[in-house]
Amino acid sequence: MRDLKYDIARSFAMIWIVGIYHMSEYVSLPLHTQQWARIVTWSCLGVFTFISAYFLSGKNTFFNFSDIFLFYKKRLLRFYPLFFVAAITMLLIDFNDWDQTWRGLLGVSSYYAPQINTLWYISMLIGFYLITPPPLSYVENYNINYCYIQLSSLEFAFVNLYLEPELIIGFFIILQYMCWGLYLLDTFRFQGK
């Protein structure tokens, strides 16, 4: 049976991010200029990513390449077609330029500027989905701790920090929430065996 408290927490996070914080720019109440609003927004992004990774870890096991391929197919087909249409529409109405659009569609705009406006989190999800199966399969098959995975992601962040500092920091802050969500469920799942 599904526990609704997680869905409620994700829903409140989405309502704040999309319905209040993001939309405030369009109604002449720019919350993005307020420090407290940015803190609440980053917290909501962390909550949303943590809970999503927690459930992602619980629903998927990767023992071979066909499991990994099925994961990619299922995840990308779930959001990519609508993301593609939204990104192209934003390009056609000049909300984003071609440089932002192609980097967003490839999922690299989170660490290779310029970021795609409005859709940057979806673009970042492409990268998260691409890196999810290897850590999960190593943890399941070899019982490797997620701390090593987090350490390697931080090393990557520091090596690339000089390229796009503001993008890299945001991406890897959210990546840490994802890793903790994956790690906690796997920890409890392995203790239950």
Image (cartoon, rainbow, N blue to C red):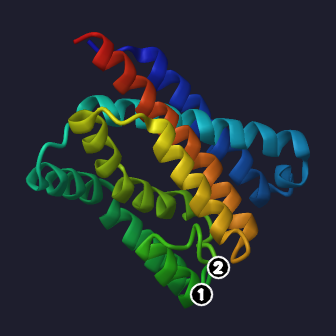
**Is 13 placed above or below 99 here?**
above
Q: Identify which amino acid the numbered label 1 is placed on.
A: Asp
Question: Going by the image, does 25 lie left or right of 79?
Answer: right
Classify the position of the C terminus by image quarter. Answer: top left
| Element type at mark 1 | loop
Q: Are marks 2 and 1 in contact (CB under 8 Å)?
A: yes
Place of residue 6 in the rendered image (x, y in percent of width and height, measured from the top left): 47, 21
Q: Which quarter of the figure has residue 146?
A: top left
Q: Which quarter of the figure has residue 117?
A: bottom right
Q: Residues within 10 Å of mark 2 (few under 14, many from 20)?
A: some
Measure the alpha-carbon separation of dots 2 and 1: 10 Å
Q: Identify which amino acid the numbered label 2 is placed on.
A: Pro
Q: Residues within 10 Å of mark 1 (few under 14, many from 20)?
A: some
- Closer to the camera, 45 or 179? 179
Place of residue 172 in the rendered image (x, y in percent of width and height, measured from the top left): 61, 53
Q: Mark 1 points at which residue?
A: 97
Q: Which quarter of the figure has residue 57?
A: top left
- Closer to the camera, 94 or 74? 74
- Closer to the camera, 152 or 82? 152
Q: Which residue lies furthest to the bottom in this view?
A: 98
Place of residue 125 in the rendered image (x, y in percent of width and height, measured from the top left): 45, 56
- Closer to the camera, 144 or 168? 144
Res. 49 visible in picture: no
**Is 5 placed above or below 7 here?**
above
Q: Name the residue under label 2.
A: 114
Question: Going by the image, does 12 lie left or right of 182?
Answer: right
